[in-house]
Image (cartoon, rainbow, N blue to C red):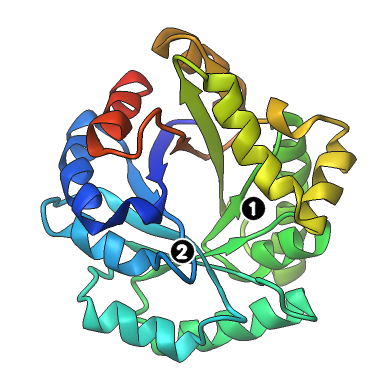
């Protein structure tokens, strides 16, 4: 496990930063480049900006809430932005849907019908039912804010879903964002990011189930060498570890400094 290393940054940094960062991320040998998606910072245009100056790196959005954007809207945006089907990974999550598992199952079925079949689809999962659903229907399960031990627990739930659907074991790539902050104020940056998520009831329950303080999940390191060492337990637990950058400054240079420090 752990051979694939991806890199991710906040979509709020915008397409210009994406275009500046992407070629170097590809040159450094990262397998994938990811961004998130919010109402004020849509992820797909950021991926389109990353696609233009690159040739190989996979491009993922993780994740689009299916209660906020319909499958048809997502597919239309993929087409209009001319995202390369062989490189694109479309991640979906339940958002605030009243029935999360049913909502994601429906959205996934629709996307499978209308997206190019070469487009990989990821499902964001946290609890056991969503992890099993990802095992049944996804190409990738995208985890978030989990310890290595919890990732192993989630992997077993994904494998249960694979068995239930009659899929080969290991059909679903188990990937996760791992927040990484390096240098001055690293612990504060990690704790601040975790604290924002911990205000969500679902994430609060997840942190409680793991029995950890939110600010201890992820990597806060004094140096790049320390960061790479701290990532090792995550890489041992995952098929693809996605370094989710928490840079010192919201600039391309600051993001690239972190990418170079944690490079494969």
Judge by depth and name the residue closer to the eye, 214 or 78.
Answer: 214
**Residue at point 60% right, 39% down?**
193
Q: Is residue 217 left or right of residue 203?
A: left
Q: Is residue 194 above or below residue 65?
A: above
Query: Residue 132 placed where, x, y %?
Result: 75, 62
Q: Is residue 42 above or below residue 77?
A: above
User: Farthest left residue?
Assistant: 53
Q: Quadrant of residue 255?
A: top left
Q: Which mark is residue 210?
A: none
Q: Is residue 175 left or right of residue 113?
A: right
Of the numbered discs 2 and 1, the one sitting upstream in the chain is 2
Q: Quadrant of residue 86?
A: bottom left
**Residue at point 59% right, 30% down?**
190
Q: Which mark is residue 169?
A: 1
Query: Residue 186 placed where, x, y %?
Result: 52, 21
Whole-number angstrom distance, CA of label 2 to CA of label 1: 30 Å
Q: Can residue 87 be seen here? A: no
């Amino acid at each position: 496990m752990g051979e694939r290393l991806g890199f991710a940054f906040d979509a709020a940094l915008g397409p210009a930063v994406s275009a500046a960062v992407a070629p170097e991320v590809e040159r450094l040998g990262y397998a994938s480049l990811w961004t998130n998606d919010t109402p004020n910072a849509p992820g797909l245009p950021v991926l389109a900006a990353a696609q233009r100056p690159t040739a190989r790196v996979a491009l993922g959005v993780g994740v689009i809430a299916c209660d906020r954007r319909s499958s048809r809207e997502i597919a239309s945006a993929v087409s209009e932005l001319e995202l390369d089907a062989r490189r694109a990974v479309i991640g979906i999550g339940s958002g605030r849907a009243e029935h999360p598992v049913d909502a994601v199952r429906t959205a996934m079925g629709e996307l499978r019908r209308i997206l190019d079949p070469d487009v990989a689809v990821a499902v964001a999962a946290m609890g056991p039912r969503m992890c099993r659903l990802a095992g049944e229907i996804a190409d990738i399960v995208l985890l978030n804010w989990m310890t290595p031990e919890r990732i192993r627990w989630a992997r077993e739930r994904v494998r249960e879903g694979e068995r239930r659907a009659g899929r080969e074991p290991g059909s679903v790539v188990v990937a996760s964002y791992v927040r990484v902050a390096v240098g001055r104020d690293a612990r504060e940056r990690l704790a601040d990011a975790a604290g924002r998520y911990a205000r969500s009831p679902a994430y609060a329950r997840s942190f409680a189930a793991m029995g950890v303080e939110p600010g201890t999940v992820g990597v806060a390191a004094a140096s790049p060498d320390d960061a790479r060492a701290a990532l090792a337990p995550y890489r041992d637990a995952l098929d693809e570890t996605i370094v989710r950058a928490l840079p010192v400054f919201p600039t391309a240079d600051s993001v690239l400094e972190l990418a170079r420090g944690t490079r494969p």
